[in-house]
Amino acid sequence: MKDVRQEYHAPGLTEADLLADPVEQARRWVDEAIDANLPLANAMTLATVSAHGRPSSRVVLLKGIEDGGFVFFTHYDSRKGDDIAANPNVSFVMFWGPFDRQLIVNGRAEKLDPEQSRDYFASRPRDSQLSAAISPQSRPATREQLEADMASLAQQYPEGETIPMPETWGGYRITPEEIQFWHGRPSRLHDRFRYLKQGTTWTRERLAP
């Protein structure tokens, strides 16, 4: 692995390229990645910390940028849900290799209003609703039992009937306190800008790579 290297050739990033509002700048980068049909353009690696100070991370999908925050959905009684309940401070990173771009967000996560979660749950494909409803996420389970539970629920709610959203499933909004934009440059002299929330405004500074 020590000999694996990739040079960056992108033109880079300047302050003039960035919007004053980092949330809107993040939206722009995400939209550009989606418009370019990059694989899993909305994938983000979310890091949480447990009540005992143990960090963990996993890939989740960003499902919206609204009300000044970043939205994703999951099981509230999963490991990440337990972590957030104990410590709402979280961080996530999104990386788009073809663009030589990286977005880092640090902030606090809070549950969405249940109605917002129900609206999104209802928009999901039927099989996704079924799997969310039966999954004891983050806990031991056999493949056979999961498939049996899913088949049983599908029989309970035939095609066309509404599958109720589990009370233990829903969305979170991450309200950012720090946002970083990273752009690869040749010779590893990358461009990196950090926005920090100061009250209701944002300050911006360039960081060394």
Image: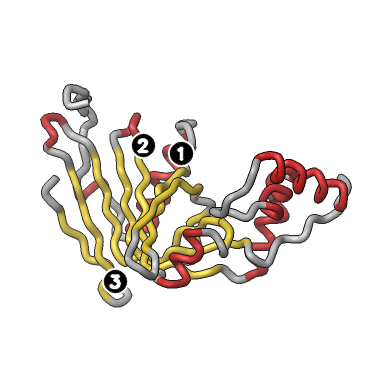
86 to 37, vertically: above or below = below
Q: Which residue is drawn at 71% across and 45% down?
A: 145
Give the amino acid type for the residue marked by disc 2 in the picture.
Trp
15 to 70, vertically: above or below = above
Cα separation between marks 2 and 1: 7 Å
**Residue found at the very far top of the displayed protein:** 3
Q: Position of residue 188 (x, y in %)?
A: 13, 34
Reading the chain from its start, which is encountered first: label 2 or label 3? 2
Badge 1 marks a residue whose secondary structure is loop
Q: Residue at x 33, y 32 (%)?
A: 97
Give the amino acid type for the residue marked by disc 3 in the picture.
Thr
Q: Residue at x 86, y 52 (%)?
A: 157
User: Total label count?
Assistant: 3
Left or right relative to 5: residue 90: right
39 to 201, vertically: above or below = above
Q: In which quadrant of the rendered view does residue 143 lie?
A: top right
83 to 153, vertically: above or below = below
Tag 3 residue? 201
Q: Which residue is drawn at 35% across and 68% down?
A: 52
Left or right relative to 85: residue 121: right
Reading the chain from its start, which is encountered first: label 1 or label 3? 1
Badge 3 marks a residue whose secondary structure is strand
Q: Do the residues labelled 2 and 1 touch (CB within 8 Å)?
A: yes
Q: Where is residue 79 in the image (x, y as percent from the top left)?
A: 49, 59
Q: Which colour scheme is used?
A: secondary structure
Tag 2 residue? 96
Q: Which of marks 1 and 3 is in front?
A: 1
Q: Residues within 10 Å of mark 2 (few under 14, many from 20)?
A: some
Task: Report the front residue among 75 and 32.
Answer: 75
Tag 1 residue? 41
Q: Residues within 10 Å of mark 1 (few under 14, many from 20)?
A: many
Determine if residue 68 is in view.
no
